[in-house]
Image: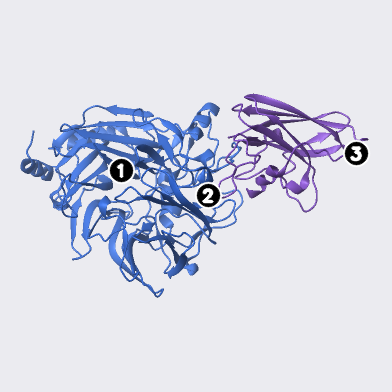
Chain colours: A blue, B purple
Amino acid sequence: MLDRRSFIRSAAALGLAHAAPAAFAGAAGLDRAHAAMPGSDSRLLGWKTPESDRMDTSVLDLEGVLPDRLKGVFRRNGPAGHDRHGLRYHHWFDGDGMIQEFRFGDGAVSHRGRMLRTPKLRREDAAGRRLYPAFGTHVADGAPVRGPDDMNPANISVLDHHGELMALWEGGSPSVIDRDSLAWQEFKTWDDSVRGLPFTAHPKVEADGTLWAFGYAMWPDPLLLLYHVNASGSLVKAAAVRVEPLGMVHDFVVTRRSIVIVIPPFVHGASAGGTFLDSHVWRPELGSRALVVSKDDFDDRRWVQLPAGFGFHHGNGWEEADGTIRFDHCVAADPGLVDDALRDVMQGRLKPAAPSRYTTFVLHPDGRADVREEEAIAEFPQVAPARVGRRNRFVYTLGGDRRPEWVPGSLEKRDLETGAVDRFAYGRDVFPEEHVFVPFPDGKVEDDGWLVGTFLAHARGQSGISVFDARRVSDGPVALAWLPYPLPLGFHGQFSGA
Amino acid sequence: MNRIQGIAALAVAAATAGPLDAGELEIEVRGIRSDAGRIYVSVHAEVENAVFPDAAGMVAGGWRLAREGRQRLLIRDLPPGRYAVNAFHDENGNGDLDANILGIPTEGYGFANDAAGFMGPPDFASASVAVSDEPGVANITLAY
């Protein structure tokens, strides 16, 4: 076993370090990748459907030394069932969800992947064809859609809350997943009053277990839903707020007193015969709008006008004593990524699109808003879980340093107080995915923790998982573990400590 | 989907047609998942100013105790014509079709011909059957 210092040297030799971002891969890995994908661009590997609905590796090949104190399970979700029954979905967001689970303990990592057999997928498999409209794919002569969960692919994130493991979509209910088998069990019903309703893939869980969430629905009316769930998993209150016009909204912000939902001007309009995505129209003249809602009283709401932009993810937000709200958002100039590039990639074309840039917002109590956009490309922002809704100093993002710009290439730690960025570049042939913050068991300061995240070394044809010391990102991973196979690129995950 | 709540307004059988009308409608509700509560059905005529399944179009209805599997009802004395039919399973026995805060039913429901709309009720035409000298037949599979 290598010690950490010699591992860092070997990582540098492999091109892991920022100074030598050539490739993860040795020649053997490249040969293997080319053998697996003759004649194709290996960068597209992450959008292929896995060969099996199940994957298992009991011990991953390890480089470096896993921290003894890092114990627990890291689970991720993302679209994996892109091709089935002779149809390749037209958009990255369409595919059936697959849980990727990495178990850390005793100095080793294991992996298992399980396609989620949702009611949608089971009915489609029984019929031998696709039956339900997807986010970006029209399905002709499909089955009736009575409610959102009829087409729920459970493919965006996971949530481990009050002992219950869930897979999250955003257009319908969470799905309860069996912790032992990772089998799909049932749709989560917080309460009959919100049964079957859309629930975000980015609920915010505060340090005491209180959960806040929202949802968006276009039927029967354009509505934002608000959820307040206590640490015991019981619904405290919920509300539906009519918002017109409204479009897809992926993430939101909580502060000590408020919920903030930024609604981009990519709005759902009348459309015949198209997909849910097709029915969205980019109307920058509307600007973006922030809905600020009191956590105590969902009827206490105000609107703040913002410049137009399209963003998916927030890192965090907080509220000052005088009511000033500060938050960040990864914002692109337009929705070209979701509207075009993420369709093109399913057809084997990696095309440019406006990338998301790290942007900070200040909502003043008098209704004014300040917006500051940085040059830096940033996506999949994460903060220490204990900082959710409270002032954070650090945010961890994926940065872009390649073409097309929207494909992440580096892990970046931003110090919001000094502006410093601590960066690790993964290298040309590696696509990093979201890295989550896992606090040290005895952590004292905000960045006392690890960053755990997956990557796809596409030229080598393998996925892996990295562990960084969050205090020193540019040192590179203290450990990384290789899977013997590639995983489809996914979205979001959660680390559940042992 | 609020309109589906309209069928919750029905009470017990209330045939409104006169004694000379001889039309019959045989309704079979399938896919009942438990013996709890009651199965309600309602029969609607196409009327102006009411969009199916608004209660305003209802001309007859009835209920049976729920029985896992299927239940049948016979509606008599309907004038010849087309009728849309829906059913729901009032599983908790509160006399209502429960719905979430958006009005989407949270108890089992269904429509004749197993018609379904997109994220809402089907239209009258697809959920309707003909009643004439011959009895009409409406089959409804509940979805929960």
Q: Which residue is denoted by mark 3 in the rendering?
A: B18
Q: Chain of mark 1?
A: A
Q: Secondary structure at mark 3?
A: loop
Q: Position of residue A287 (x, y in %)?
A: 46, 68
Q: Answer yes or no: is residue A340 visible.
A: no
Determine the image quadrant of residue A315.
bottom left
Question: Identity of the amino acid at label 2?
Answer: Phe
Q: Are marks 1 and 2 on the same chain?
A: yes
Question: Identity of the amino acid at label 1?
Answer: Gln
Q: Which mark is residue A276?
A: 2
Question: Identity of the amino acid at label 3?
Answer: Gly
Estimate how packed mark 1 is, as few (under 14), some (14 to 19) or many (20 or more) residues with alpha carbons within 10 Å: many
Q: Which residue is denoted by mark 1 in the rendering?
A: A494
Mark 2 or mark 1, which is nearer the start of the sequence?
A: 2
Q: Position of residue B106 (x, y in %)?
A: 57, 40
- Quarter holding the N terminus of chain A is top left
Determine the image quadrant of residue A245.
bottom right
For discs 3 and 1, the disc positioned in front in the rendered view = 3
